[in-house]
Image (cartoon, grey):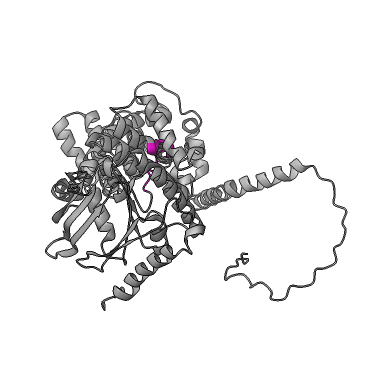
Amino acid sequence: MSLPAWSHDQDPPPLVTPAPAPAAVLALPVRRPGLAAVAARARGVAGVVLPPVIALAAVLAVWQVLSSDGTGLPAPTTIWQDSRDLILDPFFDRGGVDKGLFWHALTSLQRVAIGFSFSAVVGVALGVLVGSSRFAHRALDPIFQVLRTVPPLAWLPISLAALHEANPSALFVIFITAIWPIIINTAVGVRNIPQDYVNVGRVLRLSPPEYFVTILLPAATPYIFTGLRIGVGMSWLAIVASEMLLGGVGVGFFIWDQYNSSRISDIVVALVWVGLVGFALDRLVALVGRIVSRGAAAE
Amino acid sequence: MPSRAYLSIENLGVTFSPGAKASEVLRGVDLAVGRGEFISIIGHSGCGKSTLLNVVAGLLPVSMGAVILDNQAVEAPGPDRAVVFQNHSLLPWLSVYENVRLAVDKVFGRSRSRADRHDWTLENLALVQMTHAKDKKPAEISGGMKQRVGLARALAMEPKVLLLDEPFGALDALTRANLQDSVMEIHGKLKNTVMMITHDVDEAVLLSDRIVMMTNGPAASVGDIVTVDLPRPRRRIEVDATEAYVSARHSVIEFLYARHASFRPAA
């Protein structure tokens, strides 16, 4: 027999059960059963969708009021008038760098894809090394801890000097920015493999490659994906910043180019794109992580 | 007279030395276990009984003396000394079937065909009555079921000695009784040599041929050994009032609470 639970913010249940009130017989209106369910569902959706919509509207309204004097930042309505083409048609291509934002974002994303893939592979490998070898940890960790605090753009001059060209330099900046959280999180994941799993591997006499595939990698996967998720966010930060300096096609360059032509409205539109793409990247990596590490975290 | 017992622990000493401070956990442990025998090791917390099991498993190094199984010194872990860990330690990313299959593939990968290994995996799951959950993940089954699967994984390796490290400690009383019956039944069928760590006196008496009682640590050793003189198969309802059961139980309790009562040093 279990007691009814109540929390402190509720009144305690009455000690004396009140006599039940005489039941009144009511003729309930006949309702189609589907309708109530649809209404409940709609309320649920509205509860999720409405708050951010209201908040966005409020931000836009305040912005509109504050920037209505015409100086400084353009108001939302001004942006709509100035940059309507840019907002409505992200796919135009008039040659050169005069392209829709979709193409700029795509170019930036390609760079992120290449640079981030390298840092994922190298980062996980180094992380496994540092996580499983005490010597490697002692030797390399201080270097990692210092280098990871170097801001992404500080790498740019060095990589330009070493690689001579803009595109590989941009890729290197992404690589070097994204790799630290991947290394560090992978190493933590490998170090945190429960002793029981290690013992299972020892009793079964798994060879190092077998141990790596059957125990180490799956056990560290949730940590690895935490690192990848932070890394992809940072590489998106890095690409936008480094493109500003490197020129060519890309969201970062687009923002810089519009700044030089004093088209502030276009910059605001580009910023929204940058934010949305970064958000999508983050969610994508999180989703892949959930699929790959299915079950691993459920203990 | 046989020269050496099937599993022979001889003058075993284990000392941990993390940094400069050394702590002696076991000293001069002698124990001979016959083939097919079911041995329980009981003692107060911290007496080193888990250490003893881990040394036999090869998971911890021997500092002095030796553990000899079937005339071979134990130096490293191996599937001939399968362990059922206290917290099941199934790999959560593998299904129940895959957890057992991993062990089967590793131990019999060369000697048996793929089909045989599949059958052997299922046979062991059937032995612990877990066939119905073979495709579930460990997170989807209860604690008792996880221990059953852990037992199936250990049995599937056909170990020379089965090591049980407080296998039922985390389970409720009814589930525990159920599993104890299963272990007795399996032991009756397969005649494994079993070494079980426990802190439950009734469990020790019901399951074991002999109960090894450890003195308190540090530097613990075998204090006394009680032989449980009960015929097998045993059924818990029938045996628990017999004189042999009561006297074995009394000997263990007398040892644990009168002769070697646990003491807690201040601070």
B5 relative to B177 in the view: left or right:
left
Q: Residue furthest left?
A: B20
Q: Is residue A38 above or below residue B16?
A: above
Q: Is residue A25 above or below residue A92?
A: below
Nearest the eye: B18 or B158: B158
Span shown in magenta: B89-100
A136 falls in the magenta region: no
Residue A163: x, y in percent? 16, 30
Residue B202: x, y in percent? 42, 62
- Residue B221 visible in rendering: yes
A115 relative to B235 in the view: left or right:
left
Q: Residue at x 85, y 49 (%)?
A: A29
Nearest the eye: A77 or A239: A239
Residue A229's image quarter?
Answer: top left
Q: Residue at x 16, y 48 (%)?
A: A143
- Residue A240 visible in rendering: no
Q: Residue furthest bottom?
A: B266
Residue A268's image quarter?
Answer: top left
